Amino acid sequence: MVSITAVFGLVFIYSLAEEITLQRSVTLHCNADDGSTESVRSRLRTRDDASDKQTIWLHKGEELNIGFSLPKDGIVDVKDVRYSNDGGQDRIKITLDDEELGDFWTHPGYGWGNAWNIFWSSGPIGEMVPVDAGKHMLSLKVDEADEYGVEIDYIRFEVYGSTPQELQQDHFICKHHQ
């Protein structure tokens, strides 16, 4: 079993059987539908209690995509999404290869900007999903949100029976769908 925690700044791959931790840098890219590119740096927020001291701020209709490739069949299990929120509830949808795994509502927090450093965990999303060898795309989409959006700290998912060979050429893509 391999556990992958996609932290915005680093990807941690844990081989639980061997208890080895590997770290690779990740570059974040945001691409708008009209073909223009928005700097992700403008979306990164410094948060003292975030895993790597940064989050990525997303609004309604935006999504993060994590591509990975498996050399043989396996099972994917989304364990957790860690986030912060300062406003009303937001609905986050998780898909694997365009098939919905599940969704969750964020915890509402009203702190006049001070609740952004309070983090919550979604817990497991959906059921374990068998996947074939080959390329796959795990997506987190902000389906419903207030004007303040949500900040994502990390997405943790596990792969059983196979080891991911690549993670989207070491970068995440944030797509705007508005």
Image (cartoon, grey):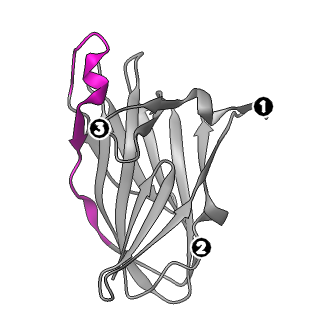
Q: State the CA–CA distance, disc 3 to disc 2.
A: 29 Å
Q: Dots 2 and 1: beta carbons under 8 Å?
A: no
* Image height of 111 relative to 32, above or below: above
Q: Residue at x 38, y 43 (%)?
A: 153
Looking at the rendered structure, the kind of residue marked 3 is Asp
Relative placement, left or right, of 41 versus 5 is right
Mark 1 secondary-structure assignment: loop
Find residue 146 and report its image quarter.
top left
Measured as percent of width and height from the top left, residue 37 is found at: 74, 34
Residue occupied by mark 1 = 36
Residue 73 percent across, percent down from the top left: 46, 87
Name the N-terminal-most of marks 1 and 3: 1
Query: How packed is label 2: few (under 14 Cα within 10 Å), some, or many (20 or more)?
Result: few
Task: Look at the numbered discs 1 and 3 and tell me whether their residues touch, using CB distance below 8 Å.
Answer: no
Q: Cα distance, mark 1 to mark 3?
A: 32 Å
Where 66 sits versus 89, above or below? Answer: below
How many C-alpha atoms fall within 10 Å of the one at disc 1: few (<14), some, or many (≥20)? few
| Numbered badge on residue 49 | 3
C-alpha distance separating marks 2 and 1: 26 Å
Residue 71 visible to the viewer: yes
Residue 158: x and y in percent read 34, 71
Q: Position of residue 90 (x, y in %)?
A: 32, 29
Callout 2, which amino acid? Glu
Q: Which residue is mark 2?
A: 166
Relative to 76, is 112 above or below? Answer: above
Q: Which residues are magenta?
A: 108-128
